Structures are given as C-alpha cells and as structure tokens.
Image (tube, rainbow, N blue to C red):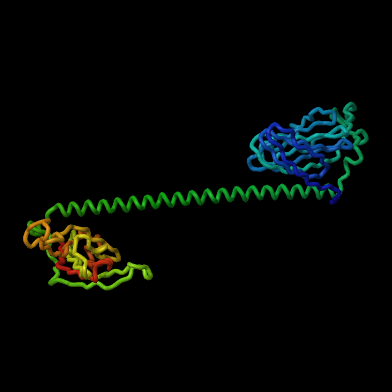
Amino acid sequence: MKIAGTILVTVLLTALAAGAVAAEATVADGDRVRGTLAEGGGDRLTVFVPAPASLDVRLRLDRNLRVALRVFGPDGAEVDADAYLRGALSRKPSLRHVPLLQAGSYRIVIEQDAGAGSYEAQLRLGAHSARVIDLATPSPADSAVRLDAAEVAYRGNGTAIDAADVQGALDELDAAVGAVREELAETSGDVSAYATAVDGLAADVAAGADARAELAADLAALAARTTALETPDPNEAASSPLAVLWELPSTQTVEAEAYVLLPGVQNDDAFRIYRHSVRSHTFAAGEIRHVVIARVHFTYRPTFKPGVEPNRGIRPLDQIVWAEVGGREIAFVSAGAEQDLYDYRDGVLGLAGTDQQYTPERTYRELVYFPTASERSDGFSMEIRYSALAFADRIEGFSVDIDNAIIVGG
C-alpha cells in the first residue's frame, strides 16, 4: 500500500533460541519491523539502496531488553556507524543520518545485548550527496576561506523536500512525543504507588506508636493502682479496706425452658436458662477506689426421666456467669465445687447394695474487676447474669437455685 509516498509494511520477526541462525527479512524505506530477541539472538534486515542515501533506524524496546545496532555495506564491510548512534543504553536507541555512499544491498543487524523481549523498529532512507568545496582559492578581501556558490555542487534531489517527507518527520515526532508521555505516565504511576506504600508504612508506624503509648499508659495506671492497693490508707480501718455492698437476701430458683438447638435435627432437644439477671447494681461516684469482687453460688437440679439412674455424668452442657459493664461482657472464673455429687447415708463407700442418693452439685464463680479511672470517679453499673444449657436425652427438665450472691468493693 502506498501512503503519502511512503511504503508502510509490518514485518513480524521472532528470534530463535540462543545460538540459532538469526531471523531475516528484506525491507524497504518506511517499513516497520517487530521482533523478539532472546539470549544471544539477533535479526538481520536487508534493504536495497539504488543510489547514495542516508539511513535512519529508530527502535522502541521492551523494558528489560537492550540491543546493539550494526550496518554492513554491499561489499560486506561494516559501516562505522558509532558516530550516528543515539540513546544506546535507553529503550529508544536510534541511528541518525548514517551515510550510505554506495548503491546496493545493506544489512542492518539488531543484536541482543542485554535482557530479552520484543522490539519495534522503523527504517527511513533519505537522499545523500557529497558536496565539492574548493578551499584552494583565498578570499580577495582577506585570508579567510572563500566559498563560491559555483564551486559547491549538490545533487539535484538533495535539496528536494516534498510534503511526504515533512509529514513523515511530523509523524515520527508525534510518535516520539507519545512514547515520552507513556513513559512519564508509567513513572508517575510508579511514584504514586511508592508514595501510597510510604503513606501506609507511616500510618502503620504511627498506629504502632499510638499502641505503644496506650500500652505504656495502661501499664503505668496498673502500677499506680497496684501501689495504691499495697499502700494502706491512714483514713481507712487497717483491718479490712473492703466492704460488703450487696448480698442476695434469699435463694432465687430459676426454671429452665424447652429449647431446640437445631430445628429438624433428631435428638437435639434441650433445656435452657437464658441471660437470667442475678443482680443489677449501681456504684456511686467515688464509692469504688480500687476493686470490685463478686461471687455467685448456684445449684443445678435436673429432673431425670423414668428409668434413668442418677449419676455423675448428668451435667449441663454449659453454665455461664458474667457481668456486663459499660457495654462489655466480663466472664466470671470457675472457683470450684462445694460438695460432691454423691451422698452416702450409711457412710459406706462403693459396696454393693449401698443406699445412694443423688445430691445436686453446688458450685460458685468469682469475678475480680478493676474499674477504670472514669468509672471510679463518675460511678458505673454492673449487671450480673446467668445462663445454662442441658440436652434432653436423659432429663425432663432442670432448675437452678441461685443460693447466694455477694458484691464486695472498696
């Protein structure tokens, strides 16, 4: 296809493995060539020059590829093109205005120099004429060299510049500007990503510093409160700085309700007591200076199905006692059992025929809570709750006695 006096042909080349014969193609003025070079690879392009001309070769390389450019004349001798090489170590090396003084076939060799990847090249041929300048005749005015227009001979087409040449040069300039913009955009993206990473790292460092500062403040507060606990207050009785603030007046009996853990699943019936409120207590401002201690005693009383022998293995799946303070849930810790599961009326242990009776287990849980500085100064509320869950495979239900509960503080 002929476009504005320039032939545009795209030639696709793929270099063979290292050590293999290079890929070759015959090209003409204006052709664009695409190829791929691996380790030790090289491509050879042959162009026929009907008359002396100048050669331009411009390349665009992948990020990791670097190449060497060589030119060989019709006689096989290498043309000294080093003086015409531009941007040898960049991604856009080029040969500019290499004089081709003989007519004939020239070979342009594109050799892998470092890395690997694809490239795109364009060849342009321009007119080239040697000028004849007579320096033998001095200027009549002085000893300076005189150049006479009649003594400077040019090839006729050496001064011919047509619209196609100008348009081609403008197209190349536009392509170069576009390539520079692409590289700037890529660099801008890299800088932006780096800046984002640095900002994220700085945020992590700041968060770490804040966490360390918060931890240091907590440790300092804990040390101060420990010192206060260990230092007797002369205004308080030396015998006991803690006082009973509330005690359960009488036993609370709570009946479990039927409950299905997973509807539609066999043998998944259960009984539960859910979030039973044992005590809702409010501490006045300044009433608690150091600590609150709470204890809850409770007895689990199952009702066995007919034919089921009471034994030690029949226990609830779980029993939980916790306190709700300022939107937080704080679990009571297990403190132990107060009596065993069995009583023996005659005092004889393990003999056949011994008259046994099942004694419900009585346990208790404790909580030690250190209020925050704002809670100590402003006062706060505490809700003590109880929950339990038991499977219904061997029992017909259960109840729980909250035998005693006490809150101590000071």
Residue situated in front as seen by the camera: 339 or 127: 339
Point out the residue furthest to the front here: 352
Is there any visible trace of residue 288 in the rendered image?
no
Query: Height in image: 220 above or below 59?
Result: below
Residue situated in front as seen by the camera: 372 or 263: 263
x then y, percent, for residue 345: 7, 62
Residue at the spot x=12%, y=63% of the render?
356
Query: Height in image: 219 above or below 144?
Result: below
Q: How many numbered marks, from 0 up?
A: 0
213 left or right, relative to 7:
left
Residue at the spot x=44%, y=50% of the render?
202
x then y, percent, for residue 302: 20, 68
x then y, percent, for residue 271: 27, 70
145 left or right, relative to 88:
right
Point out the residue furthest to the right here: 150
Residue at the spot x=73%, y=39% of the render?
94
172 left or right, relative to 385:
right
Is there any visible trace of residue 75 in the rendered image?
yes
Q: Quadrant of residue 71?
A: top right
Residue situated in front as seen by the camera: 82 or 129: 82
x then y, percent, for residue 342: 14, 61
Q: Quadrant of the C terminus?
A: bottom left
181 left or right, relative to 364:
right
